[in-house]
Amino acid sequence: MKNKILNIGIIGYGRMGIIRHKEIKKNKYGNVISIYDPKSRHNNIFTKNYDDIIKNDNIDIVFICTPNYLNAELSMKALKNNKHVFCEKPPSLNASELKKIITL
């Protein structure tokens, strides 16, 4: 069986989002096809809404590289849309949020 190239969306393009993007580029099994960051970018890979990544059927994995208070909400949205999620730490700010993430 051939290895599938996984399409990746990155939400948050600060220091960690940029680092993750550079590392993914080094890996032949991952391809970043969309990035969301609230800052204005002039590149066709950037989207103006993180839901464009979460709801994109062509994206397999969502990397969440946002401020800590957004991690749980975005992780849950991505999981509910059948995405694999790579979330920077911490995945949530409290145990009840983490339980919600785990049960999805």
Image (cartoon, grey):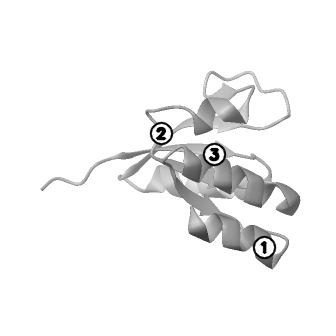
Question: Do the residues under discs 2 and 1 have CB atoms within 8 angstroms?
Answer: no
The one nearer the camera, 49 or 31, is 49
Instruction: Write down the residue under mark 3.
Output: 10
Please state the horizontal and vertical placement of residue 24, each as a whole percent of the image.
Answer: 51, 54
**Residue found at x 65% / y 65%:** 101
- Where 4 sits versus 90, above or below? above
For the N terminus, the image quarter is: bottom left
Relative height, residue 11 to residue 94 (above, below): above
* Residue shown at 76% from the left, 53% from the top: 73
- Identified by mark 2, the residue type is Ile
Choose the circle earlier in sequence order: 1 or 3.
Answer: 3
91 lies above or below 12 = below
Determine the secondary structure under disc 1.
helix
Considering only order in the chain, which callout, 1 or 2, is on the residue closer to the N terminus? 2
Name which quarter of the figure residue 66 lies in. Answer: bottom right
Provide the residue designation for mark 1.
96
Give the residue pinned by disc 2: 59
| Nearest-to-viewer mark from 1 and 3 | 1
For disc 3, the neighbor class at 10 Å (few under 14, some 14 to 19, many from 20) is many
Q: Earlier in the sequence, mark 3 or mark 2?
A: 3
- Give the amino acid type for the residue marked by disc 3 in the picture: Ile
| Rendering coords of residue 4 (x, y %) | 28, 49
Residue ID at (84%, 63%): 68
C-alpha separation, residue under disc 2 versus residue under disc 1: 28 Å
Q: Nearer the viewer, residue 55 or 80?
A: 80
Q: Residue furthest bottom?
A: 95
